[in-house]
Image: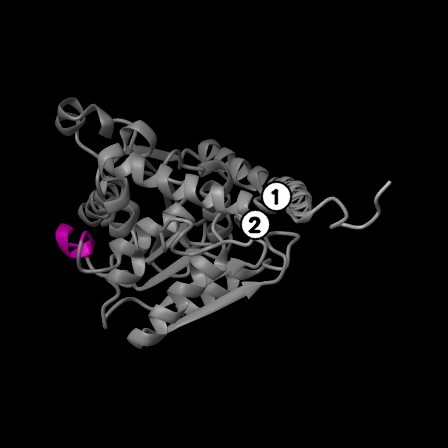
Amino acid sequence: MHFYLFAEGFAQALRTILLVYLILTFMFTVYSMARMYWCAHVGSDVKGGKERMRQLRKAGRFVQMPVYSMEEMAKEKHKRDVRMVYFPADNPRDKRFVIVLPGGGYARVCTRHEGYPVAAELNKMGINAFVLEYRAGRDCAPFGPMEDLGIALRFIQDNTDKFDVVMDDYGLIGFSAGGNVAGIFSSHKFGYLDYQVPRPGILVLGYPWTCVNDWLSHPYWNIWIGLLGVWLSNRGSYHMFGLRHIKKGRQMLDVQKYIEADYPKTFMFSGSWDVLVPASRHADVFDEALTRAGVEHKYEKYFGVPHGIGLGKRTKAQGWLERAVEYWG
């Protein structure tokens, strides 16, 4: 029996090293994914979101509404599922509001984990909140989610008395792909100017999907995580731009390309153990772009924190929402 790695030749040794690498990195990826789902389960406070909705229903204050008119929905069926839920604070500190944009990779919208619980927590701080369920999956279209956000804001602008809010200094909170929506919307192109609404007062991004590029542009040491990155970036681009324009779509969804000098001040957080949207390829890149552009911002990066944690309770990110609100002022 041979005990030395190269005893059976160099080629066999390389095959052995490759096999060991594939097995170990696969096991690490599976563990990282399982850990991510567990942290998302314990950190998102889904029960808190459900309880707040129950309270609002009981008080007769629960409001869920379509964003588009009946005529628009009849003309374009893909807009029928775009809706918004209003979470009015019991004792609002002022009349400002926040729109929460959950993630989902443009394949779906994770309102249960990254929408309702965040709005409920904002209510506890005396902040009125809306949760937007934008177009995703087969209903998505080129920059359709940004249009949904623009129309939603225009709807709020036309009904400020009904919601008892003001448009001045409103905030956007976006997670993952929702951060992609919020980041692009906060710029001049494909953004708020197209909908005659004010610029956001603050942009809050949680583990944002900002640099939608393929593996070759940002190599990964773990091939399985690299393949996940390829799949996610192409999937999001496919849903928004279609199969023929995936590559062009990835380039058009790079948020840092849209930063201008008057970009809103930004609070951003991410985790070092994010295998779906690695901070080193997304949040770190966006942080550098904001710094180069001279945009006021704050970036918090938490060691060992994965993707999809929402409120981040029972993780090192706990309290990020309070710090973001404090930064908002």
Type of amino acid at the residue the image marks with label 1: Thr
At horizontal 36% and vertical 40% (from top left) the residue drawn is 234
The answer to whether any part of residue 72 appears in the image is yes
Report whether 4 appears left or right of 92: right
The answer to whether any part of residue 85 appears in the image is no
Type of amino acid at the residue the image marks with label 2: Asn
Q: Quadrant of residue 288?
A: bottom left
Quarter of the figure with the C terminus: bottom left
Q: Nearer the viewer, residue 156 or 257?
A: 257
Q: Whole-percent x and y of residue 305?
A: 60, 55
Q: Quadrant of residue 184?
A: bottom left
Q: Which residues are magenta?
A: 190-197
Report whether 289 appears left or right of 122: left
Extreme residue in the right direction:
1
Say what secondary structure mark 1 lies in. helix
Q: Answer whether labels 2 and 1 touch (C-beta < 8 Å).
A: yes
Q: Whole-percent x and y of residue 265?
A: 34, 69
At horizontal 26% and vertical 58% (from top left) the residue drawn is 186
In the picture of the structure, the residue carrying the numbered disc 1 is: 29
In the drawing, what numbered circle is on residue 222? 2
Q: Whole-percent x and y of residue 104?
A: 42, 39
Residue 194 lies, with reference to residue 109, above or below; the image says below
Residue 326 lies, with reference to residue 57, above or below; the image says below
Distance from Cα at disc 2 to Cα at disc 1:
8 Å
The answer to whether residue 156 is magenta is no
At horizontal 24% and vertical 38% (from top left) the residue drawn is 241
